[in-house]
Image (cartoon, rainbow, N blue to C red):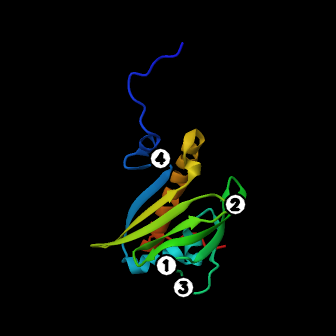
Amino acid sequence: MLRQLTHPVPPLQASRRRRGRFMGEVEHEMAVARPPGEVLPYLLEPDLVRRWQKRLVEYEFTTPGAPAVGSECRGSILVAGRRIGWRARVIEWDEGGYALRSLGNGPAFELSWRLRAEDAGSRVRYRQWSPAFDGMTGHYVRQLVDRVARRDLERLRRLIDGVEEARPGP
């Protein structure tokens, strides 16, 4: 026998939001001891990015010239021992950070980096969204990505602050 609901079912959009953000989102903030201008290369330059992102195997900008809105990049990551390739386009760009959106092949995602000057350095904000983070299975995927992001960001913080050396690039 079916039980009748005594309360209205929230609209899908509202039920997907939790604590002010979509459930399919991973977001972290951290403080570092350098100004934004010195931090941005660690988030952008392929050799530096590969030093702190443990699962990133390849990463390069494929559009000639300095990165800007419309520039494209490609890369690959290791997930459960398998190499997964991706391509993305820069959708936002300024001295305060940038955002990427995936293109056709590989996993669908958007990620952004925002930098804000603070008294003793910078505040770095990382946000990643993917439809793979939604739903029942997505809950576990999101938890895994969240743990990996936390470890990578801690490695990045130590590298920027000069506390310890990150792994050498491939």
* Numbered disc in front, either 2 or 3: 3
* Numbered disc in front, either 1 or 4: 4
Vertical placement of residue 164 versus 142, above or below: below
Label 1 sits on what residue type? Pro
Q: Residues within 10 Å of mark 2 (few under 14, many from 20)?
A: some
Secondary structure category for the residue under label 3: loop
Distance CA(mark 1)–CA(mark 4): 30 Å
Vertical placement of residue 90 versus 64, above or below: above
Distance CA(mark 2)–CA(mark 3): 26 Å
Label 4 sits on what residue type? Met
Quadrant of residue 10 within the rendered picture? top left
Residue corresponding to mark 2 = 84
Q: Residues within 10 Å of mark 4 (few under 14, many from 20)?
A: many
Distance CA(mark 4)–CA(mark 3): 34 Å
Secondary structure category for the residue under label 1: helix
If the image is split into quadrants, where does the C terminus sit?
Answer: bottom right
Distance CA(mark 3)–CA(mark 1): 12 Å
Residue corresponding to mark 1 = 41
Residue 83: horizontal and vertical position, in percent? Answer: 71, 60
Q: Nearer the viewer, residue 159 or 149?
A: 149
Residue 103: horizontal and vertical position, in percent? Answer: 63, 65
Q: Nearer the viewer, residue 148 or 98?
A: 98
Residue at 43%, 39% in the rendered image: 11
Q: Mark 2 and mark 1 in contact? Answer it, CB < 8 Å.
A: no
Which badge, 4 or 3, comes first in the chain's sequence? Answer: 4
Residue at 55%, 53% in the rendered image: 145
Q: Residues within 10 Å of mark 3 (few under 14, many from 20)?
A: few
Residue at 57%, 45% in the rendered image: 138
Distance CA(mark 4)–CA(mark 2): 23 Å
Q: Mark 4 and mark 2 in contact? Answer it, CB < 8 Å.
A: no
